Amino acid sequence: MLSKTPIDLTKIKKEDLDREILRLAVIAELDAINLYEQMASLTSNSNIKAVLLDIAREEKTHVGEFQTMLLNMDEEQVKELEEGKKEVEEILRDE
């Protein structure tokens, strides 16, 4: 359910630190989304479910914020995301 990301950022090169911080932030938000959506699926209380799903949606916004920051700092990430998108589109086109 939750990732087990080591948070020992002292071992990260200084020039990579900000990108790693942003990646860890994305991971934390994705973990939160998974947790809230799983809890929402387990509860029978509609009020709790509504609040959990609303918070999960907010966490998805946070993923977008951190990802935008990361993409502004990592040109290779931008290129590889585009490559991944093309690969999926090609696979889906062939089906």
Image (spheres, rainbow, N blue to C red):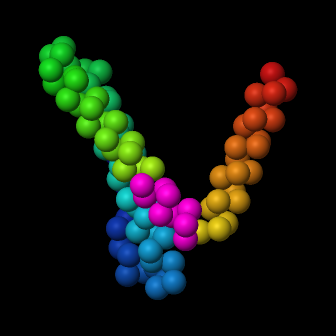
From the viewer's perspective, is 51 left or right of 69?
Answer: left
Give the residue displayed 42% in from the left and 50% down from the top: 63
Q: Tell me how many marks there are.
A: 0
The prevailing secondary structure element of the residues shown in magenta is helix
Asked if 94 appears above or below 90 in the picture, the reply is above
Q: Is residue 40 visible?
A: yes
> Residue 95 falls in which quadrant of the image?
top right
Give the residue displayed 59% in from the left and 69% down from the top: 74
From the viewer's perspective, is 39 left or right of 91?
Answer: left
Give the residue displayed 15% in from the left and 20% down from the top: 47
> Residue 1 falls in which quadrant of the image?
top left
> Residue 40 falls in which quadrant of the image?
top left
Residue 9 placed where, x, y %? Answer: 38, 75
From the viewer's perspective, is 12 left or right of 84?
Answer: left
Asked if 92 appears above or below 74 in the picture, the reply is above
Residue 58 placed where, x, y %? Answer: 31, 41
Residue 77 belongs to magenta span: no
Give the residue displayed 38% in from the left and 65% down from the top: 6
Residue 68 placed where, x, y %? Answer: 50, 58
Q: What's the magenta region?
A: 65-73
Asked if 86 appears above or below 13 in the picture, the reply is above
Residue that protrudes farthest toward the right in the picture = 94
Residue 30 placed where, x, y %? Answer: 39, 45
Residue that protrudes farthest toward the bottom in the picture = 14
Work out whether residue 73 or residue 24 is closer to the camera in this orientation and state it: 73
Q: Is residue 31 visible?
A: no
